[in-house]
């Protein structure tokens, strides 16, 4: 599948983030020309810096809330655009709702305007989240045709981003743009874990920070169930979708990329797996919630992605956690680069 990307020009928004850095590394190994537009990394350390992403891509610092990045698309004439720039944290969205909506909604409008002005883009993928759905705390997974109505400002802004993308697709692209218009899709993935995630208020980064410093891991909401998956699982989905709709525009639409049922575990079960993989007496305790509303149960139905795209999860949750620990125990940037490249090779060698 990655052979398709050799010599393709791929424009990524949010390339300095955790997922964006992994995606850049995958594409560079595939022989693509990668153009990135984003703010500077918002964590220190950052995976972007640790594995030297800026050395292998065209790195443009810009704010998705403005249209300042549109000249980048005009200059580099991308074939494919993957929109990943976002304010991605639920708790931060309660604190900064205006910024969250400006970034996640108007940012989507701005990148779609750049795509609309580009004569070269043939495939556009907007990366959203499993949290776009109206969550009824039910045991069965949500399908792509179900109601979009995120509860908190982050989730709701991503629901809005989905609706913006749908409107542009119908108004300017496949609905009215003619046979040469780009294919436009949205990709909804679950809770992503992997080496190099240093964000605050995320369970696996919190585990790594605590275990590294020899502290007991404090976990809120240990009974909440989430669709956890390794970062390469969803990136495989995004890249496969972008490729297949590039070749056949009739495949555009909304797609879920989540884990199989066996990897939908509670937070407590996830941390148990982490402690087992980490060893050396790692342990955790439940911590009182006391924060804003967060979903207790959320699961995706991934049958459409399996049937239409031929995509399926490759690594179960136990393997995903072990890969996180492998990266976390790398002591130097050279070891981290080798670890990321090894994991990419292992994963994409099996798809």
Image (spheres, rainbow, N blue to C red):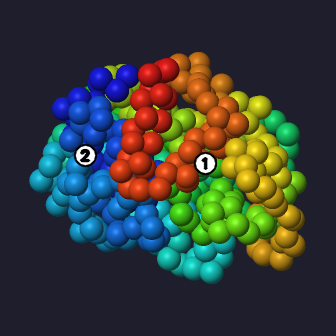
Q: Residue at x 73, y 69 (%)?
A: 215
Judged left or right of residue 127, residue 218 is right
Relative height, residue 146 to residue 301 (above, below): below
Q: Residue at x 47, y 36 (%)?
A: 343
* Cα gap from disc 1 to disc 2, whole angstroms: 28 Å
Number of residues whose C-alpha sits closer than 10 Å to that of mark 1, classed few (under 14), some (14–19) or many (20 or more) = many
Q: Quadrant of residue 108?
A: bottom left
Q: Name the residue that disc number 1 marks.
A: 325
Q: Quadrant of residue 27?
A: top left
Label 2, secondary structure: give it. Answer: strand
Rendered location of residue 315, percent (x, y): 61, 30
Judged left or right of residue 126, residue 57 is left
Judged left or right of residue 216, residue 315 is left
Q: Which one is nearer the viewer's eye here, 191 or 49?
A: 49
Rendered location of residue 32, percent (x, y): 24, 36
Q: Which one is nearer the viewer's eye here, 166 or 141?
A: 141
Between circles 1 and 2, the one closer to the viewer is 1
Q: Name the residue that disc number 2 marks.
A: 34
Judged left or right of residue 101, residue 270 is right
């Amino acid at each position: 599948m990655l052979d398709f990307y050799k010599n393709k020009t791929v424009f990524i928004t949010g390339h300095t983030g955790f997922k964006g850095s992994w995606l850049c590394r995958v594409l560079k190994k595939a022989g693509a020309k990668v153009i990135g537009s984003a703010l500077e990394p918002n964590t220190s350390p950052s995976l972007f810096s640790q594995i030297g992403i800026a050395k292998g891509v065209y790195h443009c610092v810009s704010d998705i809330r403005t249209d300042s990045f549109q000249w980048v698309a005009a200059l580099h004439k991308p074939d494919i655009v993957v929109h990943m720039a976002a304010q991605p944290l639920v708790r931060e969205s309660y604190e900064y709702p205006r910024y969250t909506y400006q970034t996640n909604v108007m940012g989507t409008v701005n990148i779609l305007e750049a795509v609309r002005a580009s004569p070269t883009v043939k495939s556009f993928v907007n990366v959203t989240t499993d949290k776009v759905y109206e969550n009824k705390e039910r045991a069965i997974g949500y399908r792509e045709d179900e109601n979009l109505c995120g509860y908190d400002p982050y989730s709701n802004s991503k629901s809005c981003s989905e609706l913006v993308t749908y409107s542009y697709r119908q108004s300017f692209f496949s609905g009215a743009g003619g046979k040469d218009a780009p294919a436009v899709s949205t990709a909804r993935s679950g809770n992503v874990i992997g080496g190099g995630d240093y964000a605050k208020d995320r369970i696996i980064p919190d585990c790594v920070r605590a275990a590294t410093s020899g502290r007991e891991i404090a976990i809120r909401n240990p009974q909440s169930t989430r669709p956890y998956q390794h970062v390469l699982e969803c990136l495989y989905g995004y890249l496969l979708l972008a490729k297949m709709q590039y070749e056949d525009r009739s495949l555009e639409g909304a797609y879920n990329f989540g884990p199989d049922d066996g990897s939908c575990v509670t937070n407590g079960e996830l941390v148990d797996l982490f402690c087992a993989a980490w060893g050396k007496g790692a342990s955790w305790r439940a911590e009182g919630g006391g924060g804003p509303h967060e979903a207790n149960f959320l699961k995706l139905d991934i049958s459409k992605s399996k049937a239409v795209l031929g995509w399926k999860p490759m690594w179960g949750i136990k393997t995903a956690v072990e890969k996180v620990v492998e990266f976390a125990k790398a002591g130097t940037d050279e070891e981290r680069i080798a670890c990321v490249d090894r994991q990419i090779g292992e994963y994409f060698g099996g798809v």
